[in-house]
Amino acid sequence: MGRGRAKAKQVKVARQLKYNSGGTDLDRLRDELGVGDSSNDDADDLNDELADRYADYADDYGSGDDGDDRPSGRR
């Protein structure tokens, strides 16, 4: 019989979580994720390394044409 109060409290908490921002510190989150930090040279080096690695695949598989001269198999 006491389920009504428990459910009402859960609904209240759920509404607070849904509609209240909670005061999220966006600067702290940005620092934790490492987004927007221009001094992050390690990430730039990693991106350059990946770009070089996949550039070889791009050379092997053509210029990126969709192959318009081949039949598509659809009618």
Image (cartoon, grey):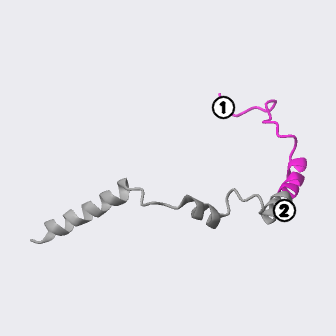
Q: Which residue is mark 1?
A: 74
Residue at horizontal 32 percent and vertical 59 percent from the top:
16
Measure the alpha-carbon separation of dots 2 and 1: 44 Å
Q: Amino acid at mark 1?
A: Arg
Q: Which mark is first along the chain, 1 or 2? A: 2
Q: Nearer the viewer, residue 58 or 15?
A: 15
Q: Nearer the viewer, mark 2 or mark 1?
A: 2
Image disc number at residue 43: none
Query: Looking at this rendering, what residue extends furthest in the bottom direction?
Result: 2
Residue at horizontal 80 percent and vertical 66 percent from the top:
42
- The answer to whether 3 is drawn above or below residue 72 in the figure is below
Residue 62 rendering spot, x and y as whole percentages: 87, 43
Q: Nearer the viewer, residue 8 or 74?
A: 8
Q: In screen coordinates, is 12 left or right of 27?
A: left
Residue 40 rendering spot, x and y as whole percentages: 77, 63
Image disc number at residue 45: 2
Residue 6 on the magenta segment: no
Tell me the quarter of the image containing the N terminus: bottom left
Query: Looking at this rendering, what residue extends furthest in the left direction?
Result: 1
Task: Count neighbours of disc 2 (C-alpha within 10 A) and say few if under 14, some if 14 to 19, many if 20 or more.
Answer: few
Residue 59 rendering spot, x and y as whole percentages: 90, 48
Instruction: Characterize the magenta stretch by its predominant secondary structure.
Output: loop
Q: Which residues are magenta?
A: 51-75
Residue at horizontal 85 percent and vertical 61 percent from the top:
49
